[in-house]
Image (cartoon, rainbow, N blue to C red):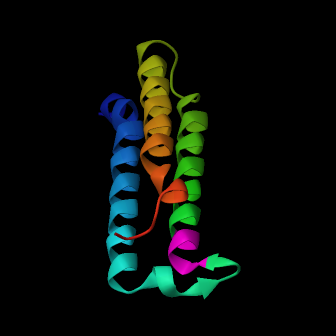
Amino acid sequence: MMLLARASAGLIFWAFGFSVLYGLHGIGCAYGWPSTEVGGGNLFRWVMVASWLLLCAGGAALIWLAKAAPSGLERRLSLTSAVVGCAATFVTGLPVAVTSACV
C-alpha cells in the first residue's frame, strides 16, 4: 500500500494544487478581488501567485521526501511522480502570474 501512495503522491498533489488554484480563481472573480488594490497590485494576483508559489514549494518538498523512499523501483516511481507533479504544478499554475485575472 505504501508503494502505491508514494508512486502516486506527486500527481495527487498536482491535482490538489490545480483544484485549489481553480477554486481560488472562481472565488476571486466572484467577489471582485481584481478591483481590490493591495501593495502595488490587486488582491487577486497576490492570492493566486502566493498560492501557486506555495504549491510549487510543496511539490519541491515532495521531491525531497521521495528521496527517502526505499531504493529500487519504489524510489524511482516516487521520484518520477514527484518530479512530474512538481513540473505540472509549475506549468499549469504559470498563467496565474502572466495572464489577466477575470474575463
Q: In the figure, is residue 20 to the left or right of 54?
A: left
- Image position, residue 44 (x, y; %): 50, 75
**In the image, what residue occupies the spot 40% across and 33% down?**
6
Please give the count of numbered marks on the rendered protein: 0
Q: Relative to 25, does residue 83 appear above or below in the rendering?
A: above
Q: In the figure, is residue 8 to the left or right of 95?
A: left
Per the image, is 68 magenta? no
Does the magenta stretch mainly form a helix, a strand or a loop? helix
Q: Relative to 74, does residue 65 appear above or below in the rendering?
A: below
Q: In the figure, is residue 36 to the left or right of 3?
A: right
The one of 30 and 7 positioned closer to us in this rendering: 30
The one of 61 and 72 positioned closer to us in this rendering: 61
Where the N terminus falls, by quadrant? Answer: top left
**In the image, what residue occupies the spot 34% across and 44% down?**
12
The one of 91 and 69 positioned closer to us in this rendering: 91
- Image position, residue 37 (x, y; %): 60, 85
Where the C terminus falls, by quadrant? Answer: bottom left
Can you name the residue that lies furthest to the top here? Answer: 72
Q: On the image, which quarter does residue 63 sit in? A: top right
Can you name the residue that lies furthest to the right here? Answer: 39
- Image position, residue 62 (x, y; %): 53, 40
The one of 14 and 40 positioned closer to us in this rendering: 40
Magenta stretch in the rendered image: 42-47
- Image position, residue 39 (x, y; %): 70, 81
